[in-house]
Image (cartoon, rainbow, N blue to C red):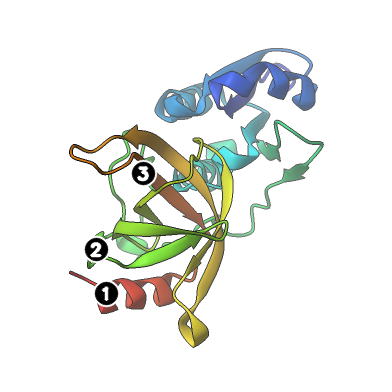
Amino acid sequence: MADAPVVLIGPSQHIEGLKERANVDGELLTFADTNALQALQAISERRPSLVVLERLFAATPRGAALINRIKQDPQLAHAEIRVVAHDSNHTRTVSRGKAARPAPKPAAAAEAPTIDYRGTRRAKRFKLKTGVELLVDGNPASIIDMSVIGAQVVLSQQLRPYQRVRVVVGRDKDVCRCTAAIAWSRYELPGGTAGGHYRVGIEFNEPDAERLEKFCRRHQA
């Protein structure tokens, strides 16, 4: 498919840098990661030869869902899926052997994963008791609510969207460690005498879902 375009998806502020790292000849279609639905539509209609995703976006549930949709579409079997970093020479080709995020269903009811382009929840969220914490890059963060794919926390340190962090949930034999990406972050200044803090949404990357669900149920409010 010599005339097939290349599709590139990543944070809007890194698109130009990603273009250079992708080193693509021919037609290039670029999409911000916030426009994943439009990107999927273009991929389905134009059937690109190559789909390039920024590394941090590919590690989020939205990025994994997009990868799965491409891998499960037989009309896109020719398309290479490549993950690149905006700030290093890191690059890898995604294998078509298995889905990026397992979600088994009976064959009769199977369907492609949906893309969470509006931030809707794709896993049960648990409201946790006051005072329950996890560690973000070694710093304590109070958990507001949590699921097996992410958490909403409050902490004093500033974190930027798409920043990669290390998360530790629980302790001792029940500890769960994983990498994660910051999905969103906002600064809040509560009334009264309390100081400001950051409310942050975290998306886990390949966590131990069974262990996280047990943690959520154990500390559920």
Secondary structure under the numbered disc 2 in the rendered image:
strand
Q: Which of these two is toward me, 193 or 78?
A: 193
Outermost residue to the front:
193
Vertically, is 73 above or below 44? below
The residue singled out by tag 3 in the image is 114
The residue singled out by tag 1 in the image is 219
Total number of numbered discs in the rendering = 3
Tell me which amino acid carries mark 3.
Thr
Mark 1 neighbour class, 10 Å CA radius: few under 14, some 14 to 19, many 20 or more: some
> Residues at badges 3 and 1 in contact (C-beta under 8 Å)?
no
Tell me which amino acid carries mark 1.
His
In the picture, measured across the screen, residue 136 lies left or right of residue 26, that is: left
Secondary structure under the numbered disc 3 in the rendered image:
loop
Sequence-wise first label, 3 or 2: 3
Sequence-wise first label, 2 or 1: 2
Tell me which amino acid carries mark 2.
Phe
In front: label 2 or label 1: 1
Vertically, is 183 above or below 122? above
Work out how far the residue at label 2 is from the one at label 1, CA to CA, in angstroms: 9 Å
